[in-house]
Image: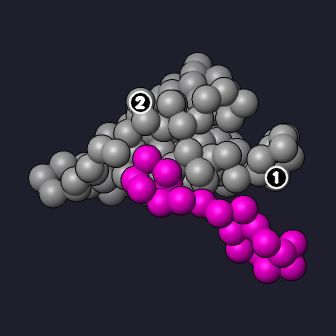
């Protein structure tokens, strides 16, 4: 487990689906904050790069290719964000484990993600 310190550096925020409707809006709202480093990610690095270039100045930004069907734990570990937002949309296939991204983001920090016990609970 790597420690993630924020003091004297930018808060690194990974936005999966960062150039889509919801993720893009979030990035637009946060892009002027110079204390942030935005990792705009999605299935197309070229689309992420075009989106990053169109944002106004402020936050540091990086365009990344991230495919939720791949090894998310490894990819998140490589990117090493402080915060992960999965804004890839409700129409993406989550497969047999709809909490893969949540687990991949939390488990390296020592959090165990238990399966949902009730469909009505709305919580993990």
Task: Please state the horizontal and vertical placement of residue 72, each as a whole percent of the image.
Answer: 59, 35
Vertically, is 69 above or below 96? above
Magenta span of residues: 106-124
* Marks 1 and 2 in Cβ contact (< 8 Å): no
Number of residues whose C-alpha sits closer than 10 Å to that of mark 2, classed few (under 14), some (14–19) or many (20 or more): few
Q: Residue at x 43, y 47 (%)?
A: 108
Give me the residue at 53% from left, 59% from top.
112
Q: Which mark is residue 90?
A: 1
- Up/down of 85 relative to 117, above or below: above
The image quadrant where one finds the C terminus is bottom right
The residue indicated by pointer 2 is: 78
Inter-mark Cα distance, 1 to 2:
25 Å
Q: Position of residue 4 (x, y in %)?
A: 27, 50
Q: Is residue 34 above or below residue 94?
A: below
Q: Tell me, yes or no, whether the highlighted magenta stretch contains residue 12.
A: no
Which scheme is used to colour this image of the protein? one colour
Indicate the position of residue 87 as horizontal and vertical percent values.
66, 51
Instruction: Please name the residue shown 83% across and 75% down the image.
Output: 118
* x then y, percent, for residue 19: 62, 40
Instruction: Label 1: state its secondary structure.
Output: loop
């Amino acid at each position: 487990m790597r420690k993630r310190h924020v003091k004297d550096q930018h808060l690194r925020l990974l936005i999966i689906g960062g150039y889509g409707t919801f993720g893009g809006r979030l990035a637009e709202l946060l892009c002027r904050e110079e204390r942030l480093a935005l990792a705009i990610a999605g299935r197309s690095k070229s689309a992420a790069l075009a989106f990053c270039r169109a944002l106004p100045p402020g936050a540091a930004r990086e365009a990344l290719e991230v495919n939720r069907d791949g090894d998310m734990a490894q990819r998140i570990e490589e990117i090493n964000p402080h915060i992960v937002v999965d804004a890839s949309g409700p129409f993406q296939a989550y497969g047999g484990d709809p909490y893969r991204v949540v687990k991949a983001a939390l488990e390296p920090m020592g959090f165990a993600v238990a399966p949902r016990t009730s469909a009505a609970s709305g919580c993990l």
